[in-house]
Image (tube, grey):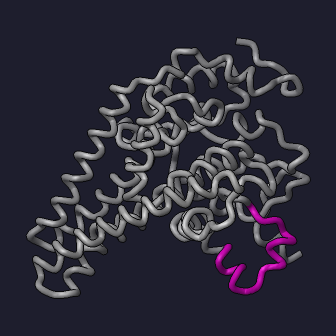
């Protein structure tokens, strides 16, 4: 297929190469994925509660975190209205699936659907893994620089996502646009009540089994807190590899285009089938940005069409550890005018 010249290419041109069948949503398939994940999550949680040994508990807790991430990915699809063919069902599923990851549904839609997807890799607009300039880094105090160095290192996904996305844009977010205020407040109360109910139940089970407060606190920690932190690291790392690599250019507000954001600004990362089975093809990310209507279970087909049409503009490769490590060494600061990543040495010269 002929690739249009960059100066004439529009996002509609990219969307049009994706077969219409890729936008077909299946309620049965969406519910099957939800049912499978919920059953697996419930089984792992039950295993932790009934675990007779500490070593079995330590083995099960990471799986609980991974299942929280898996359900979150389905909730993310539901928030885009793509998981099933029923709009009300998508909303209900999204709110339910977001509870174990402590995310407020309507706040996520505002920050993720409207801002991140609407302005991907755009300076001052896309807040997810937004790079700092040399001048911005120099203006940071010692604590700010240390925090930046940690968050943009190999160890960074957990503290970065926890602070910048979950806390700042989800929990502590108090001034949304007026039309979003009531919806976000309503979903905030729903989440808090759901988490309170879950924590109360966990504390009761822990106290019942141990007969003391410490046992109740430990049950909440191993059922809810540690799995949430594992999820946070997984999703923070996932978003990083989607959008941060020396090949991806961030753009000034004036120089940004929809094609630059949605086609050039993300990746298709090939993973083992078992990873896609549990994380619902989230690493096949470019078609999701090109057209949010594509359900997760049709992303592979859409990716083949996009890669065939735009082979020179699509980042489509296996995800390798050395590629990620190279990005964490290279991608520290950014020159938006030149479109280049810089090391911390640039701030010392």
Can residue 107 be seen here? no
Q: Nearer the viewer, residue 3 or 349?
A: 3
Q: Residue at x 35, y 37 (%)?
A: 277
Left-right relation of 139 to 103: right
Query: Residue 238 or 75: which is nearer the viewer?
Result: 75
Name the residue: 64% across, 67% down: 174
Q: Which residues are magenta?
A: 131-148
x then y, percent, for residue 20? 57, 15
Q: In screen coordinates, is 50 left or right of 288?
A: left
Q: Main secondary structure of the magenta part?
A: helix
Residue 136 forms part of the magenta stretch: yes
Who's the residue at 67% across and 23% down the image? 15
Q: Quadrant of residue 332?
A: bottom right
Q: Tell me if I can see residue 221 in this picture.
A: yes
Work out whether 305 lies above or below 274.
Answer: above
Relative vertical location of residue 341 with respect to residue 27 in this rendering, above or below: below
Q: Position of residue 88 (x, y in %)?
A: 45, 35
């Amino acid at each position: 297929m002929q690739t249009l010249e960059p100066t004439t290419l529009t996002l509609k041109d990219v969307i049009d190469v994706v077969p219409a069948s890729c936008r077909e949503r299946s309620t049965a398939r969406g519910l099957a994925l939800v049912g499978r994940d919920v059953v697996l999550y419930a089984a792992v949680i039950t295993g932790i509660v009934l675990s007779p040994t500490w070593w079995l508990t330590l083995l099960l807790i990471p799986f609980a975190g991974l299942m929280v991430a898996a359900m979150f990915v389905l909730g993310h699809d539901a928030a885009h209205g793509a998981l099933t063919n029923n709009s009300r069902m998508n909303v209900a599923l999204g709110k339910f699936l977001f509870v174990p990851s402590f995310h407020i549904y309507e706040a996520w839609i505002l920050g993720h659907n409207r801002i991140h997807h609407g302005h991907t890799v755009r300076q001052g607009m896309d807040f997810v893994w937004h790079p700092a300039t040399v001048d911005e880094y120099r203006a940071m105090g010692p604590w700010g620089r240390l925090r930046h160095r940690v968050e943009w290192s190999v160890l960074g996904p957990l503290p970065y996502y926890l602070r910048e996305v979950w806390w700042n844009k989800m929990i502590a977010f108090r001034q949304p646009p007026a039309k979003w205020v009531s919806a976000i407040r309503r979903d905030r109360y729903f989440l808090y009540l759901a988490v309170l109910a879950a924590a109360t139940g966990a504390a009761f089970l822990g106290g019942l089994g141990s007969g003391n407060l410490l046992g109740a606190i430990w049950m909440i920690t191993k059922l809810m807190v540690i799995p949430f932190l594992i999820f946070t690291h997984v999703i923070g790392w996932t978003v990083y590899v989607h959008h941060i690599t020396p090949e991806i250019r961030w753009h000034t507000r004036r120089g940004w285009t929809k094609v630059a954001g949605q086609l050039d600004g993300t990746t298709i990362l090939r993973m083992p089938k078992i990873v896609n089975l549990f994380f619902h093809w989230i690493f096949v990310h470019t078609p999701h940005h090109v057209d949010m209507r594509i359900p997760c279970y049709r992303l592979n087909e859409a990716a083949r069409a996009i890669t065939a049409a735009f082979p020179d503009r699509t980042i489509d490769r296996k995800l390798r550890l050395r590629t990620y490590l190279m990005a964490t060494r290279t991608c520290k600061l950014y020159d938006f005018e030149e479109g280049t990543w810089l090391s911390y040495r640039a701030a010392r010269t």
